[in-house]
Amino acid sequence: QKRVFGIDGVRNDQIHRVAYDGCYPNVQEFVDCATTDEPPSENDLYNTRIMFMEKAKMHFEQVTLNCRETCKEIAAATSRYIHHVRVNYEAYLKELPLDKEVFVIRTKSLWQDWVKVNNLLGSPKDVAIPDSINEGKVVNTQDRLPVRSNLSNEGRESLCKLLRNEYILYIDLLNRAVNLSDSDIKSALDDVHKNCPAILESIL
């Protein structure tokens, strides 16, 4: 998991950032936090100080995050601080007719997919692929991710349940993608089965 900053203003971006450190420093703690049914406690509160620049002025503010609420809102895609969980597959697809074909560009095969899609759209020759490591090989990643992954088997199962609807929409996108071969789709589904086998088995 990596930081993805919001579009809801610099103040909320800062709240988003401190949630990683104060509420769920690793994926297992996020899953526990998002799925627990235990009564709320004082340990759910995280007090910290944020600072942000707005209208050419530096602001400082003490904030209190309710970590239980924050985690559950992230899991439910309703977080007011972390916008990218709201702008998920469902948000993108809700107004797209079910019979529409789509182009899919995968992070793992970004440049190959980019070339193929451009060719399908009528490009007379292959688009240039960047040569440098920064542009051509490192895509959507960081050297050091702020949230560590240390999931237990039970934690993985819980996370898969939280992501079930997203996975279903992801599989639908794969099947509708005009630029992916049967082999591409099989490889992607193999990854789904590796990460969340119960989801794939429940819908196939």
Image (tube, helix red, strand yellow):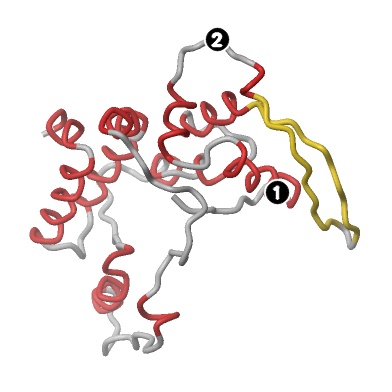
Mark 1 vs mark 2, foreground winner is: 2
Q: Residue at x 74, y 52 (%)?
A: 10
Taking the image as shown, residue 89 lies to the left or right of residue 190, namely: right
Give the number of the disc on residue 39: 2
Up the image or down, 188 lies above or below 35; here it is below
Residue type at mark 2 is Pro
Q: Position of residue 191 (x, y in %)?
A: 19, 50
Give the number of the disc on residue 41: none
Given residues 143 and 188, the one toward you in this image is 143
Q: Residues within 10 Å of mark 1 (few under 14, many from 20)?
A: some
Q: Position of residue 17 (x, y in %)?
A: 63, 48
Residue ID for mark 1: 14
SS at circle 2: loop
In the picture as drawn, the residue positioned furthest to the top comes out as 39
Q: Residue at x 20, y 61 (%)?
A: 178
Q: Position of residue 157 (x, y in %)?
A: 27, 30
Up the image or down, 126 lies above or below 34; here it is below
Q: Residue at x 23, y 57 (%)?
A: 177
Task: Write down the quadrant of residue 195 in the picture.
Answer: top left
Up the image or down, 2 lies above or below 46; here it is below
Residue type at mark 1 is Gln
